[in-house]
Image: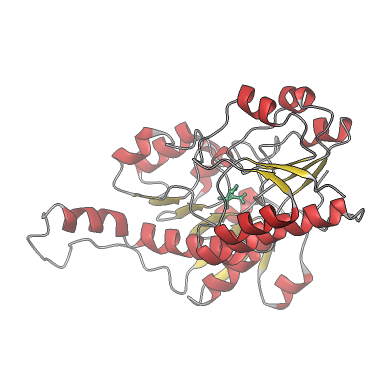
Amino acid sequence: MSKPKVLVTRKLPDSVQQRLQRDYDALFNHDDHVFDRGELLAKAEGVAAILPCHSERFSADVIDALPDSVRIIANYSVGVDHVDLEAAKRRGIVVTNTPDVLSDATAEIALLLALGAARRASEGDRLVRRGAWTQWSPSFMVGTQITGKAVGIVGMGRVGRAAAQRFRGLDMEIHYHNRSRLPEAQAQGAHYHASLDEMLGAVDVVSLHCPATPDTTGLINAERIARLRDGAILVNTARGALVDDDALIAGLKAGKPAAAGLDVFNGEPGGDPRYRELDNTFLLPHIGSATTETRAAMGERALANLDAFFAGREPGDRVA
Ligand code: 8YV
């Protein structure tokens, strides 16, 4: 029997590419450039599956233009906001993601961003590097301690729970806003807030962990920023779309929030250049899942979904 033809849009870890080469008729992107719409559609000609990253957009018009041969989009990502799931359903294309395996790595980055923003790590690093560390005084580089303070998790899914676990390690009081109250979180003493607005005024660090959907786009806007406590810190490892950049930049300039740690941006790669001008930002280039271990595990998870699909079973991580 011939092997299913799979288009792999980006260069993946060697172990994953080797497995793809062994078990599939894989078409690789060896120089790892980002396909534009035309190249994506041309390369998809005759393939049964596409294994993309969040860097390729499958809008409704791309999905509608995909060749009939494409039966599954097995994403190498947990977020699926780059895929129009309704359009995929209409065309009968199965869509999967890679949950769980990147929760710990992303939660590490949430903790890093919270600490980095609170303790002015990026500002301090830049100061030392440019040889400007020439003095010390009791008021030099004073930040905020987050140990023992309250953190509000927006979206208590897998990554949110993994982040909460790490914030607990700093003796932080855990608050969360989620569609529903979670028995496990309640049992661990977390405070549930049905209203995000209410939670924002009750915490010192706000960490975003919900998916980007039409409902959550611009969730952190000027009115919500105004509700933050004095000295509050905003952390985003989820998606840039959750934040209204104009509102956050104006807020950071005015000192509310006091600082922000951002790993994700509207307009990636690059993000809004105004963030770079601010000392009270700690900025990373979307590296939430960027560990050797996690990137290999994401590949295994995407492969497990492909394996199940082509064996005639329901893929474990089907989202459409
Ligand atoms: C990945 C992510 O880097 O999985 C996600 O949703 O945002 C990141 O951790 C990226 O999506 C890989 O495609």
Classify residue 215 by image quadrant: top right
Where is residue 274? Give x, y as percent.
35, 34
Compared with residue 235, is residue 10 higher up or lower down, i.e. above or below?
above
Where is residue 74? Give x, y as percent.
74, 47
Q: In screen coordinates, is 48 left or right of 144?
A: right
Q: In screen coordinates, is 189 left or right of 87?
A: left
**Can you name the residue that lies furthest to the front here?**
1
**Can you name the residue that lies furthest to the right here?**
312
Compared with residue 44, is residue 28 higher up or lower down, i.e. above or below?
below
Tell me which colouring the rendered structure shows.
secondary structure
Residue at point 37% right, 60% down? 116
Which of 91 and 156 lies nearest the eye of the viewer? 91
Q: In screen coordinates, is 67 left or right of 113?
A: right
Which of 270 and 224 lies nearest the eye of the viewer? 270
Q: Quadrant of the C terminus?
A: top right
**Total count of labels:** 0
Residue 152 in sight in this render: no
Classify residue 316 by image quadrant: bottom right
Residue 237 in sight in this render: yes
Residue at point 67% right, 59% down? 19
Residue at point 42% right, 54% down? 230
Where is residue 265? Give x, y as percent.
49, 40
Where is residue 99? Give x, y as percent.
70, 58
Classify residue 139 by image quadrant: bottom left
Residue at point 65% right, 64% down? 101
